[in-house]
Amino acid sequence: MDDRNRVIPQEELALQQDYADRVRQLYRARLPRQPLACVVTFGCQQNEADSELIRGMLADMGFGMTDDEERADLLIFNTCAIREHAEMRVFGNVGQTSHYKKANPDVMICVCGCMPQQPRVAETIKKSYPYVDIVFGTHALYKFPQLLYRRLTEKKRIFDISGDERGVILEGVRSVRKEGPSAWLSIMYGCNNFCTYCIVPYVRGRERSRSPEAVLEELRSLAARGYRDITLLGQNVNSYGLDQQGYPDFAELLERCNAVEGDFRIRFMTSHPKDASEKLFDTMAKCGKVCHSIHLPVQCGSDRVLKAMNRRYDTKRYLELVDYARKVMPDLTITSDIIVGFPGETEAEFEETLALLERVRFDSLFTFIYSRRPGTLAAEMPDPVTREEKQRRFDRLLEVQNRISREINAGYVGKTETVLIDGLSDDPNYDLTARTAGFKLVHLRGDRGLIGQYARAEIDRSSTWALFGKVK
Ligand code: 5AD
Ligand code: SF4
């Protein structure tokens, strides 16, 4: 199958551009001022990147941006389906908008992203949230101008959760990125792994890689525009290129990215341990721009549970990878995701996860209590452990990890690190925030004019979550 079949054709994008112009004209007739849009993003970096595309389309439609929901003429909720909690938050936020609609019936409310890609959720919005105007899923993202045009002209609510699960690749839609020296760069979309707890493969479709040429061109352009911290994004970057004949694999792509001229750092996420390889770590070690930092979700420390999760590696392989990576990059930072309370997880199996934490000593963790996602395989598994017990395990996990993070961070005190200064600190005792190559957050005293630049930072204090110091 030719990849180009799946790239949205230029004519389709030109059509959307046409709709964007028409929306611009409609708003010009409706309002005596520039219309304002507010994009509220939930969930992962992939969603952040999608929201940047949405902002690009909004700019083409003539919208200005606001962070103030109450001032917006168009409100867009880009949603996440990964856990029930995320969905409840979205419903809470969307529920609030009925007030805006009462105050101003012309306000447009739009819900998009992973949640409505599930028919069950689209149905709920249709029935219980009648003031939502436009609903579209991840596959229809690029059609936003057309959907908004239809809503403005057809006087009915618009639902588009179409799209076949193979999915499409979007090239040529501009991103309006957040301010600052960091940028996301999507290299692939979708996921083939079907971990039994996870909804992602159902809402984002199958893995599909952008062409290496498209990735490199975007990277060159970001570097030329002065971005200094560029994160290659994908649900599972380690399987980059495997869906297409003749594409480089991820390690080779990294090498090509590393060869792009400019003064910037390269990161990537997320890596799946089943596809991470010694070759990848060797490549990281030899590529000067690639940060010695990896997010390598292990999920749990029990081989039985890993199997039930369909992760396709065991703890032995995971530890082998970590040991090898540290051998070739002694300064490597490693972060991970852990789920506690997967259906049927026993106390002994949970303790295996704690033992793994002690053995690996992650820099930090993203920790989750298992959340049942209708439609996934794990949702059908017996789950006898009580909510309270899961919460207790979760608290114990945090306690262990917080101690480890605190100990690791304390090891930085007295050292000098090269950091990229990326913003203002919200801590009144400090001026700036920065990131080490290992992505550790540093609060610094120093000149505000340094934002966007590299600096040497003397670390004089640490906590569980951050390092503190001054610009040298
Ligand atoms: N429940 C809890 N955590 C989940 N994750 C994915 N699906 C679920 C779920 N159903 C976590 C995994 C994944 C991270 C992005 O979210 O740890 O790596
Ligand atoms: Fe979900 Fe697993 Fe895919 Fe990650 S790799 S998105 S956890 S199915």
Image: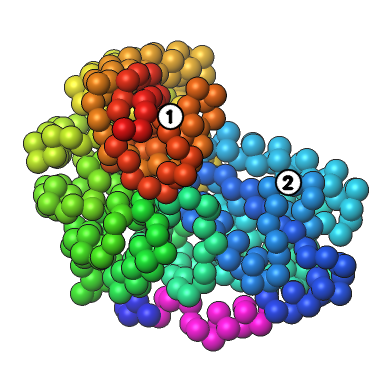
Q: Residues within 10 Å of mark 1 (few under 14, many from 20)?
A: some
Q: Quadrant of residue 250?
A: bottom left
Q: Tell whether position 14 is magenta.
A: yes
| Vertical placement of residue 153 versus 445, above or below | below
The correct choice, above or below, for 160 with respect to 193 in the image is: below
Q: Position of residue 118 (x, y in %)?
A: 58, 53
Q: Which residue was labeled with disc 1?
A: 445
Name the image colouring.
rainbow
Q: Amino acid at mark 1?
A: Arg
Using the numbered discs, state the Cα–Cα distance from disc 1 to disc 2 in whole angstroms: 31 Å
Amino acid bearing label 2 = Asp
Q: Residue at x 25, y 65 (%)?
A: 260
Quarter of the image where one finds residue 12: bottom right
Q: For disc 1, does the CB lie below 8 Å from ligand 1?
A: no
Q: Which residues are magenta?
A: 5-19
State the image coordinates of residue 456 (x, y, percent, origin top left): 29, 37
Residue at 35 percent across and 18 percent down: it is 461
Mark 1 vs mark 2: which is more N-terminal? Answer: 2
Inspect this view and state whether residue 297 appears.
Answer: no
Instruction: Identify the residue at image location x=18%, y=52%.
Output: 288
Q: Nearer the viewer, residue 22 or 263?
A: 263
Residues at circles 1 and 2 in contact by the CB criterion of under 8 Å? no
Say which of marks 1 and 2 sits in front. 1
In-front residue for pair 31/320: 31
Residue 60 to residue 303: above or below: below
